[in-house]
Image: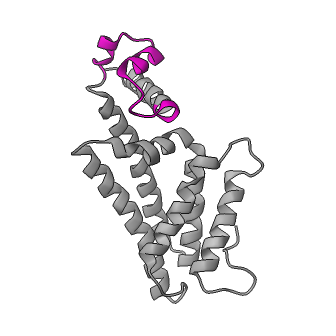
Amino acid sequence: MSANKYEEIAQAAIRLFQQKGYHATSVQDIADEVGLQKGSLYHYISSKEELLMKIAHQSISGFNRRLEKIIDMEVNHREKLFMAVQTHITVVAANMQMTTVLLREAFSLAEPHATIIQELTDRYLDLWTRIIDEGIAAGEFKPGNSRLKALAILGACNWLYRWYETDGPLSADEISKVFADIFLDGVAYHKPGGSIPPS
């Protein structure tokens, strides 16, 4: 199997799933997009769901890896939360089609794929919760339901895929700083001179 051809097929699936939705996209649509006969496409993939699984797994695994690196950094928890927000928003903005597929279409996966993606998604939420829990324990963050706070932050950040425009008035970096300021204002104890770490 040609790795380049498989990647071309995966990228075509991302575009089509984002534009039309997973259920409205047929295998024939994907074959047409990459210039193959439908039968020939099955030399590269076993099913349309295989492509959705690959896309979702690659996306959520990438989010997890980035956040794990932030958690391992020797910085305070305010800075970790700031970097987590900035990184999440930057990745969403830079990969709008793939992120849209993950957030909007991955629910269409059947078992065992659905459970695999759910476990990775739960892992990501656990990592966010850990940052907040450790910040509370260190006296940097206000006490409270850390999981609920993590869900609120992720909900706001993920909604970016519905309204962000790459050619809009604000860059992803500018948006991430505004969001981080809002979240730290709600989660962290105030420090003199502002609520977010210096950029």
Q: Residue at x 32, y 54 (%)?
A: 118
Here the colouring is one colour
Q: Please check the rendered image and state whether residue 30 is part of the magenta-colored stretch, yes or no.
A: yes
Write down the quadrant of residue 84 in the picture.
bottom right
Q: Position of residue 1 (x, y in %)?
A: 30, 20
Total label count? Answer: 0
Q: Residue at x 41, y 24 (%)?
A: 9
| 157 magenta-colored | no
Which quadrant is the C terminus positioned in? bottom right
- Is residue 77 visible in the rendered image? The answer is yes
Compared across the picture, whether 164 is left or right of 150 comes to right
Q: Does residue 76 appear in this view?
A: no
Q: Which residues are magenta?
A: 17-44
Residue 184 lies in quadrant? bottom right
Q: Position of residue 135 (x, y in %)?
A: 49, 81
Q: For the view shown, which residue lies furthest in the front direction? A: 24
In this view of the protein, which residue sits in the foreground, 94 or 118? 118
Q: Residue at x 34, y 13 (%)?
A: 38
Q: Please report the residue visible at 50 percent of the width from the left and 62 percent of the height from the top.
A: 154
Left or right for 39, reference 4: left
- Using residue 80 as the reference point, say whether residue 172 is left or right of it: right
Up/down of 18 relative to 45, above or below: below
Q: Residue furthest right?
A: 169
Location of residue 70 in the rendering, given as x and y in whole percent from the top left corner? 49, 65
x, y percent for residue 86: 60, 60
Q: Is residue 107 left or right of residue 186?
A: left
